[in-house]
Amino acid sequence: MEKKKALVICEEAIVNEIIEFMLEKLSYDAEIVDTPKDAVSKIESDKYDLIIIGKNKGTIVKHKLAEILYTKALVKPNLIIIYKEPGEVIPKEPYLTVLPKPTFYDEFIDALDKAGLKPTLPLQAAKIDIEDFVKASTEQIKPIHEFFKGLKGNIKFSIKAGDLRVVGFTMGTDLYLIYSDLENPYSLLSIGVVKVMTEQLNLSEFLNFPIDSNTFKINIRDFIVKSIEDIEDKAKLLSFLPEEDATVIVKAPAYVLKQIELIDKNINVNELIENSNSITFRDVLEDKSNIDKIKAVACMYLLNMIEGGTNQTKKKYDVKIKKSFLKKIIEKIRGL
């Protein structure tokens, strides 16, 4: 039987091994690339029956990459499969099939980790000078959660907390860590007050970075959700939020809030939107006994899906009147 050909665009080594083994058993020859540029080059010069798109080193969203590959293909593929991450929105197209990204290997690694068997690999991208990566001369001292809440645009950053250091950058909606002293990158959100230096990152500089398999890359939203899910300290989670009397102002539509399982499971999204600007954080958190609800609220706040407003009922309006003027008013009243 003649083998069919599959093109896999994915940067995750374990996922690639699994897909390649599975395709081989199904009589497919698999070619694996990790960038959209390489994928376009191959699709323009060869025929592929199947395309599989997973997490890759490109900045273009997966469904747009699928559209480009389908349009530019030397011969149209019979099927394009996208492995969907939690929270991703993939529009329907006749040539697309969307499957949930396999996660059993993550669960396996987590099990090893809990048993103390997970290998720890150094997190450092090759050929990048960590000491000279951010050239800004001024440091800001702030809680780490404020840094993530205020993330905007494409930036390089260097974070220090005591002897710990984390260096990375953001590009589009992705977070890259090129150096970290933390064994678990998701613990970054728990380290408290830090010293931060930031600098703008331009696209040409990004394209020249020698990003390799030791670079930790993740969608910023997924990073914050995962980091919050890992925190079991209620006081830490509550410290991320405004004061309890602040009103909850909803900034995101319902469908966006419901895309995140942590929020959808623990928050009545429709009710929250209906009461936007009229209920407080205290109301939403109730008696603070439900840590998953606290996590969901912290998640919404750090992702700027909700904000804290002033509770109008708590305002006091004091009017100062001169005694002489007040005396005249009293006399007028008495004379009526």
Image: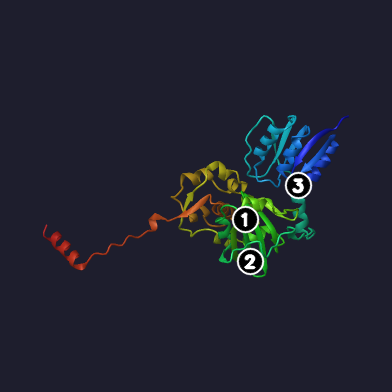
Marks 1/3: CA–CA distance: 21 Å
Q: Can residue 178 be seen here?
A: yes
Query: Relative to the observer, which residue lies in front, 101 or 298?
Result: 101
Among numbered discs 1 and 3, the one appearing first in the sequence? 3
The image shows residue 240 at horizontal and vertical percentages of: 55, 59
Q: Residue furthest left?
A: 335
Looking at the rendered image, the quarter that the C terminus falls into is: bottom left
Residue 247 placement, left or right of 123: left
Cβ–Cβ below 8 Å for labels 1 and 3? no
- Secondary structure category for the residue under label 1: helix
Residue density around tag 2, few if under 14, some if 14–19, many if 20 or more, within 10 Å: some
Residue, disc 1: 228
Q: Can residue 237 be seen here?
A: no
Looking at the rendered image, the quarter that the N terminus falls into is: top right
Which amino acid, mark 1? Ile
Marks 1/2: CA–CA distance: 20 Å
- Residue at left 63%, top 66%? 160
Query: Relative to the observer, which residue lies in front, 162 or 7?
Result: 7
Query: Foreground mark, 3 or 2?
Result: 2
* Residue 266 against residue 40 in the figure, above or below: below
Q: Which mark is residue 104?
A: 3
